[in-house]
């Protein structure tokens, strides 16, 4: 990859980062309007988990550039979440809290500040205390009001966080929960033939799996979970497990270039970004020249080329949910976060 192309994608990543506040910025404590155009935005919903991913996105930029402005932006996001949440770390959704915990642990790594590690452990402990149970197999519920409903969006982040906290603290309790949750996911929601990951089970109290929800972020979470446990379970070849799911996601959910639109709601805008984040984790572990690495990297390049091919170069509007289309409003900032995650991954690949 030439230095020129490396510079192009680093510049695009910075421009994408800057576009978030420029297109969605709001007075404190709102911080970001929920959608663009902002004059039409409905800001009545506090999107805790979107902001958790914004924290991750700001840390992506800091890791890439070393720019202290990006680190300060990350601190600001953390402060905004806690302040708008009434001074509390916690809410009713275990997946929301785990997203926040994953980003906060990265913030600890970037700053070395103990308070962020303390927040991360507090979130993990709260989730386990209130949501970990044996209904339908030992695993984590989705939210406090539905303790019998288990899904990938809750258990996937628990695996990733538990493995990372074990590495950070040396405490076995974290990785023990991670391994149990991973085994539950594998046994209950992962297709044994192709590795496709379903969303959840027992949502309506009838024991059924929600096979109608075929989302990219479930695939990304399982990929990330397998990669995080790969060194701990060498006999299981979890990198191969992650590759299988990553490639199946491209086959099943994309046209070979971009993922299809997954819905019109704001939450769905973030789904692709989660896949790209944890695909990047897998690509870092695969050797140069590996056929799967080559194929998956080619998909990242094709999809980000399509994303930026549909963008106005001045970035006077956000990405569309369909990356092959010109953007038109209203567009939630969750969609722009996915575009930022994919662009940051492309910048890393081309560095």
Image (tube, rainbow, N blue to C red):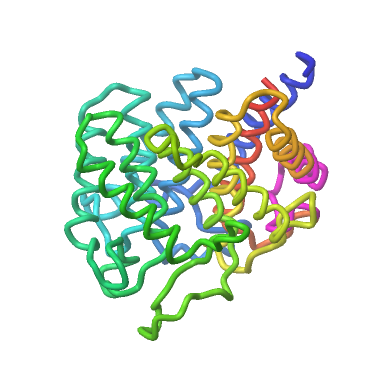
Where residue 287 sits, quadrant-wise, is: top right
View extreme (front): residue: 235
* Residue at screen point 41% across, 39% down: 229
Report whether residue 192 is seen.
Answer: yes
Residue 321 in magenta stretch: yes
Image quarter in which the C terminus is found: top right
Image quarter in which the N terminus is found: top right
Residue 197 in magenta stretch: no
Our reading of the magenta stretch's main secondary structure is loop
Give the number of marks: 0
Where residue 91 sits, quadrant-wise, is: bottom left
Q: Position of residue 115 (x, y in %)?
A: 21, 32
Q: Position of residue 277 (x, y in %)?
A: 55, 41
Where residue 9 sits, quadrant-wise, is: top right
* Residue at screen point 49% across, 50% down: 221
Q: Which residues are magenta?
A: 304-324
Q: Is 303 rendered above or below residue 218? A: above
* Residue at screen point 52% across, 66% down: 198
* Residue at screen point 46% across, 42% down: 236
Left or right: where does residue 12 sit relative to residue 233? right
Q: Position of residue 219 (x, y in %)?
A: 56, 54
Report whether residue 38 is seen.
Answer: no
View extreme (left): residue: 129
Looking at this view, is 165 or 38 the one in front?
165
Q: Position of residue 202 (x, y in %)?
A: 39, 78
């Amino acid at each position: 990859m030439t230095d020129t192309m490396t510079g192009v994608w680093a510049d695009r990543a910075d421009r994408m980062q800057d576009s978030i506040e420029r297109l969605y910025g709001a007075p404190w404590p709102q911080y970001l309007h929920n959608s663009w155009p902002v004059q039409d935005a409905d800001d009545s919903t506090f999107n805790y988990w979107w902001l958790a991913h914004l924290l991750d996105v700001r840390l992506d930029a800091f890791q890439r550039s070393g720019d202290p402005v990006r680190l300060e932006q990350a601190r600001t996001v953390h402060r905004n979440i806690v302040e708008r949440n009434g001074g509390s770390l916690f809410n009713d959704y275990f997946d929301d809290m785990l997203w926040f915990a994953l980003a906060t642990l990265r913030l600890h790594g970037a700053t070395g500040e103990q308070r962020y590690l303390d927040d991360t452990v507090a979130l993990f402990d709260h989730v386990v205390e209130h949501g970990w149970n044996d209904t339908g197999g030992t695993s984590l519920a989705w939210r406090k009001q539905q303790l019998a409903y288990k899904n990938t969006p809750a258990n996937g982040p628990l695996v990733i966080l538990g493995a990372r906290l074990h590495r950070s603290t040396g405490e076995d309790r974290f990785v023990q929960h991670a391994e149990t949750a991973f085994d539950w996911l594998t046994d209950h929601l992962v297709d044994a033939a192709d590795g496709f990951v379903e969303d959840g089970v027992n949502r309506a109290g009838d024991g059924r799996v929600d096979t109608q929800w075929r989302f990219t972020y479930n695939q990304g979470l399982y990929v990330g979970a397998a990669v995080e446990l790969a060194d701990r379970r060498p006999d299981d070849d979890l990198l191969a497990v992650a590759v299988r799911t990553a490639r199946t996601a491209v086959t099943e959910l994309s046209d070979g270039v971009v993922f299809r639109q997954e819905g019109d709601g704001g939450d769905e805008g973030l789904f692709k970004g989660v896949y790209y984040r944890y695909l990047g984790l897998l690509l870092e572990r695969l050797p140069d020249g590996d056929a799967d690495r080559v194929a998956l990297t080619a998909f990242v390049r094709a999809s980000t080329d399509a994303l930026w091919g549909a963008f106005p170069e001045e970035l006077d509007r956000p990405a569309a949910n369909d990356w092959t289309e010109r953007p038109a409003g209203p567009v939630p900032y969750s969609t722009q976060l996915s575009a930022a995650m994919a662009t940051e991954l492309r910048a890393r690949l081309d560095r």
